Structures are given as structure tokens and as C-alpha cells.
Amino acid sequence: MSAVVSYRALLRIVGPAYVFVAFLGRLPLAMSQLGTLLLVSSATGRYALGGAAAGTLAVANAVGAPLAGALADRLGQRPVVLVQSWAGAAGLVGIVAVVGPDAHEALVLGFAVLTGLAVPQIGPLARVRWRPITRDEKGQRQLVDAAFSYEGAADEASFVLGPALVGLLAVLADPGGALLSGALLLAVFGSWFALHPTGRLVEQLAGSRSRDDGRVVTGVFLVLVVAQVCVGTIFGSIQTGTTVLATEQGHAAAAGLLHALLGVGSVIAGLAVAALPERIGYGRRMLVAASGLLLLSWPLLLVHSIGALVVVILLLGFAVAPFMIGTFALAGHLVPPRRVGTAMTLLAGATGIGYAIGSSVAGRLADAGGYTPAFVVTVSAAALAVVVSGGSQRPLRAAGQAGAAG
């Protein structure tokens, strides 16, 4: 079954509306961090507070996502995502309401924590639905592979479009208007995703939950968690290094667009992964993609102009989505069916933690030596991804083979 045929089959099974809703539902998370940074920094004139508020929101979301995923596994996605969507929308509105020239730091950070905990991780939860959606279809393995490839590309596209949308709305209105738009998107499309008929399939799994569904956190799953921390570290360090280089070149406003280029190649590669033959297992795909991350990231250490940076970031993006698709797909095979939501949101949370690590470490190094030391963090994270993937090939391949047999 070709990738195009698989994608057509998925659209036929679930309908274009679901794909549209699930994509728009994940945009507010991508908008919230940059929107908070811009709003708090511009309103208070304190960039440190803006960065702290955005980072606090990101870490709170990384911590809260697995808790919400576990609750969704137990109760079903509908009630959990519905409550999260409205609570997250209220949190974004609250940030806009409390931020002003004399805003109290504790109040701003408190709302950032509450908002981060509430905003749902639509992308990982959408992955959970594909196995029950396709369970009665022929060639389910190929269909799920295609679905996970699409979801990886959709996540990357959302983190390109989300910040770009914030930038556009900040120019047309103001940063507060951008966050309010994110709140509206979350209330409408987050709720729509929660109430979509596909949510009933996950509720059926939750309703039939046995007393012992097995463990989520195993040795192999921890490998996948570390792998996603590496990816998040790459994201955070590249964003920091790109911002420093663009600022030094006198084009600070272009930093967001430059970082977004990473997602362009990633979207293309993510959609193409579905065309890979089954004999190339997920473990092997992870190792090849990790090697690509290392091979394509080290030229960052030689970059000294925006033109060169554009080329390197575009090419590096082609290794990102295949690596992430491998980790999420393996997680789907490793854990019991009724615990997949917990697993997917744990991996998403690990990515967020990695982002915080990468941006903070790269920021400290950039303060001392500029953008090149920041990019050292990127290359180091890619090297660690190779070590983790290469050193765990036997259990990773065994997990993939067991999932294929299942």
C-alpha cells in the first residue's frame, strides 16, 4: 500500500473534517508560548519576566500533559479534553487580563502555570485514536504507520504556523489579541475534537479497562523518553542560537521565521515516511534519523551568516520528523492499548522538558560566547540521540517486531 493510497484511505475512514479539527485544535499550544513571551515583554518592558512566563507555561504543560493523558486513559478523552479546552482558553484570557505595565510577577507566573497545566496536547491524543479508528480495516499496520507519519508532520506544521500566526496577529492587532485568538481556537476546536465521534472509540477502551493493564514506564520506554528529550533540546538550542545569530546580523525580527524553517523540511519528511517498507523497522528508522540529525547539525558550528543558516536548518528538518515518528510509533506498540494516552503525552512532555533544557543551557553559553556555543548544544543533543538509539537497537527492534506480530 503506497503512502498516497494510505492517506486516501485514512481520509475515507475518518473524514476530512476530523483531520481539519484535530490540526486546528493543536495550534493554541503552539501559539501560547510565543504569545505569552511577546505580550508580557511588551506590556511590562521586562524581557526576563516575559521569558520566565513563557518558560513556566511550557514546563507546566510538559508536567501536566502526562497527568491529563492518564486521566483520559481512565475516563475517556471526551470529558478530559473538553474541560482542558475551556480551562486552557480561560487561562489564556486570564493572562491577557492580568498583564499590564505594573503587573505583579507572581500573578503573571501563576496564570502561566495554570494555563500550561490546562492546555491539552491534542497531537498525542489524536495519535491514540488511530488504532481504534482503523481496527476493522485491512492493512491496519500500514494505515497506522501512515497516520503516525501524518501526525508527526501535523505537529511540525502546527509549530511553524502557530508562531507565524502569533506574529501576524501581533502586527495586525497586538500580542494580547494573538493570545485571545488562541483562546478562541482552543475553545472551539479543542471542544470539537473532544466531542468528535472518534472520541467514543477511546471511551470504549476506557470503559473496558481491566484492573491490571500493565506498566507504561519500562526500560525500553525510558529510551524513548530520553530520545524525545534530545529532540526537545535540539529545538530549544536551535531557537536560541538562531535568535542570537539573527540579532547579531541586525535581523532580530527574522529569528522566528528562521526557526520555522526547521519545520518545513520536517513536514515534508514526515509525510514521506509512510512510503517506507515495513521491513525497515522503527528501531532502525530511529537510528538512521538520529544519524541524520548528527550529520546535518554539525555544519551549524561553521555557520556565520543568515544565508548559510537557512540552508542548514532546512536540511536538518528532514531528519526531525522521521526520528519523532519512530519514537511515538514504538511507544504505541510498547504499552497496553488502554495506556497509550499516558505514553503519548509522556513523550510530548519529555519534548517540552528537553526544549526548556536546550534553550536555557544554550542561552547561558550564548551569553558567554555567542551563537556557536549555543549550536554546540544542538550537536551534542544529536550525538546523544545516536548513542541512545544505537545502544538500544536490540530492545527497540524487539519491541517493533512484537508490535508488528500483535
Image: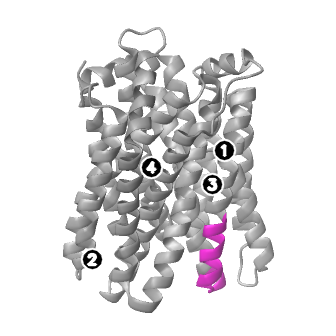
- Magenta highlight range: 42-56
Residue occupying image coordinates x 22% and y 81%? 305
Q: Is residue 265 visible?
A: no
Measured along the vertical axis of the image, is residue 97 above or below residue 351? below
Measured along the vertical axis of the image, is residue 191 above or below residue 184? above
Q: Secondary structure at mark 2?
A: helix
**Residues at circles 4 and 1 in contact by the CB criterion of under 8 Å:** no
| Tag in front: 3 or 2 | 2
Residue 181 spot, x, y in % from top left: 58, 55
User: Hey, what amino acid is under mark 1?
Assistant: Pro
Q: Which mark is residue 62?
A: 3
Residue occupying image coordinates x 71% and y 50%? 118
| Tag in front: 3 or 4 | 3
Question: Label 1 neighbourhood size at 10 Å, few (<14), some (14-19), many (20+)?
Answer: many
**Residues at circles 3 and 1 in contact by the CB criterion of under 8 Å:** no
Residue 406 spot, x, y in % from top left: 47, 16
Q: How far apart are labels 2 and 4 at the CA level?
A: 28 Å
Q: How far apart are labels 4 and 1 at the CA level?
A: 20 Å
Residue hosting label 2? 301
User: Hey, what amino acid is under mark 4?
Assistant: Ser
Residue occupying image coordinates x 65% and y 47%? 65
User: Hey, what amino acid is under mark 3?
Assistant: Ala
Q: Which mark is residue 89?
A: none
Residue hosting label 4? 158
